[in-house]
Amino acid sequence: DAKTTQPPSMDCAEGRAANLPCNHSTISGNEYVYWYRQIHSQGPQYIIHGLKNNETNEMASLIITEDRKSSTLILPHATLRDTAVYYCIAPNQGGKLIFGQGTELSVKP
Amino acid sequence: GAVVSQHPSWVICKSGTSVKIECRSLDFQATTMFWYRQFPKQSLMLMATSNEGSKATYEQGVEKDKFLINHASLTLSTLTVTSAHPEDSSFYICSAKGSVYNEQFFGPGTRLTVL
């Protein structure tokens, strides 16, 4: 697995966009970047994944730099329910997800 | 997204007993299932990977004789914690991956407390 680095915590005002960065400078050409989040005492929830192109779904947008060494998850209008730990993961070919410490996002009113 | 369930959602048992946790993929066939555990204020730790019909592959440091994994069908995997001790108390989470989706889907977790 490519190693990923995320800030340990971030705050965001309710209604504003939350931009969560992730560095993955050792990612290989065929490794996807996945984002999951975990709300307290629940199982992780899949958010989005991408390889090279930017991706958008109903939950979030994923912006991947051209050199693929970093990416940003964007929650366009954060709500209090988006408070969670967000994990950026680049699994290997075997599909294993190795979780780091993630970013603890606190959305404040 | 696909749905994965776990049963039970929580269990309390006496030291020395065995506990079985079920993980089911409800609306897709899971060719691979993964088992994780999570201690308080820590991240998820992968314990093992199981492919349907094959023996599970355990991560380094995880005792295969203590954590028995069975993946007998494409919709069910079980984790049995044998001779549980208080240090096995943790949040156990499964995930499932099928051939249709690239992503893994996680169950809601099972909280095990060993007295």
Image (cartoon, coloured by chain):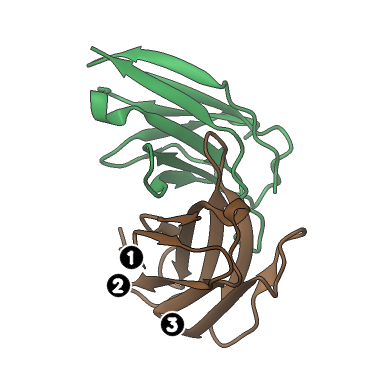
Chain colours: A green, B brown
The residue that mark 2 highlights is B26
The residue that mark 3 highlights is B74
Residue B17 as seen in the image, left or right of residue A106: right
Residue B31 as seen in the image, left or right of residue A15: right
Dot label at residue A30: none
- Distance CA(mark 1)–CA(mark 3): 14 Å
Image mark 2: chain: B
How many numbered marks, from 0 up?
Answer: 3
The residue that mark 1 highlights is B5
- Distance CA(mark 2)–CA(mark 3): 10 Å
- Distance CA(mark 2)–CA(mark 1): 7 Å
Q: Where is residue A78 shown, x and y percent of the image?
A: 27, 23
Pick the residue in front: A72 or A96.
A96
Occupied quadrant, residue B106: bottom left
- Regarding mark 2 in the picture, which secondary structure is present there? loop
Q: Where is residue A55 shown, x and y percent of the image?
A: 40, 40
Task: Please report contact status of discs 2 and 1: CB closer than 8 Å, yes or no.
Answer: yes
Query: Depth-wise, is mark 1 or mark 3 nearer the camera?
Result: 1
Image mark 3: chain: B
